[in-house]
Image (cartoon, rainbow, N blue to C red):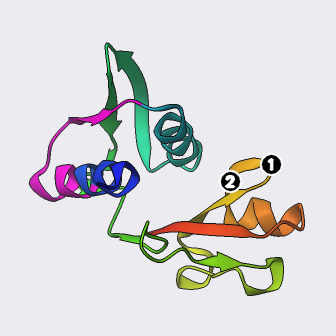
């Protein structure tokens, strides 16, 4: 039902079992989400194959780059926050992915540009 949650959970489960890469369904939105995670260093290279995105998972001395992923805004319950109310994940050690009018970005980038929006997920 929720392709964003499906993609995030596939990444989380891939890290939990120690996979090298995972496949998620392709959409422009999910590709942008994976690019944000890649810029922040949580996933490696991305490759598009047919209707799939192959996401390479990153490990640092056999420890996964992602400890946990929490989906905040769901199709049944949307969560919108203003710039002053954007969440801080583990005092800046993690990121919150925010969907703003200027596209997907992290909470730090949204604060810098003074934008609020829908809080999609918390990642640390």
**Residue range (magenta):** 12-26
The image shows residue 27 at horizontal and vertical percentages of 45, 32
**Residue 16 inside the magenta-drawn segment:** yes
How many dots with numbers?
2
Label at residue 102: 1
Q: Mark 2 points at which residue?
A: 105
Label at residue 47: none
The quadrant the N terminus occupies is bottom left
The image shows residue 65 at horizontal and vertical percentages of 36, 56
Q: Are marks 2 and 1 in contact (CB under 8 Å)?
A: yes
The quadrant the C terminus occupies is bottom left
Residue at x-position 53% and y-position 40%: 29
Q: What element carries label 1?
A: loop
- Report crowding for label 1: few under 14, some 14 to 19, many 20 or more residues within 10 A (C-alpha): few
- Report crowding for label 2: few under 14, some 14 to 19, many 20 or more residues within 10 A (C-alpha): many
> Which mark is in front, 2 or 1?
1
Residue at x-position 51% and y-position 48%: 37
Q: Is residue 97 left or right of residue 43?
A: right
Image quadrant where residue 123 sits: bottom left
The image shows residue 30 at horizontal and vertical percentages of 47, 40
Residue at x-position 57% and y-position 50%: 40
Q: Distance between the residues labelled 2 and 1?
A: 8 Å
The image shows residue 50 at horizontal and vertical percentages of 31, 13
- Farthest residue toward the top? 50
Q: In this view, does 44 lie above or below 69?
A: above
- Farthest residue toward the left? 17
Q: In this view, does 117 lie above or below 5?
A: below
Image quadrant where residue 87 sits: bottom right
Q: In this view, does 81 lie to the left or right of 64?
A: right
Q: In this view, does 94 lie above or below 39?
A: below
**Residue 110 visible in the picture:** yes
**Residue 91 inside the magenta-drawn segment:** no
């Amino acid at each position: 039902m929720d392709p964003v949650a499906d993609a995030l959970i596939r990444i989380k489960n891939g890290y939990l079992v120690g996979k090298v890469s995972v496949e998620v369904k392709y959409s422009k939105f999910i590709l942008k989400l994976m690019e944000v995670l890649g810029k922040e260093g949580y996933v490696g290279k991305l490759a598009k194959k047919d209707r799939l995105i192959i996401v390479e998972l990153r490990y640092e001395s056999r420890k996964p780059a992602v400890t946990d992923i929490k989906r905040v805004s769901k199709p049944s319950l949307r969560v919108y926050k203003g710039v002053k109310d954007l969440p801080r994940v583990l005092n800046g050690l993690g990121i919150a992915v925010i969907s703003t009018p200027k596209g997907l970005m992290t909470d730090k980038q949204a604060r810098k540009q003074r934008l609020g929006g829908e809080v999609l997920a918390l990642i640390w």
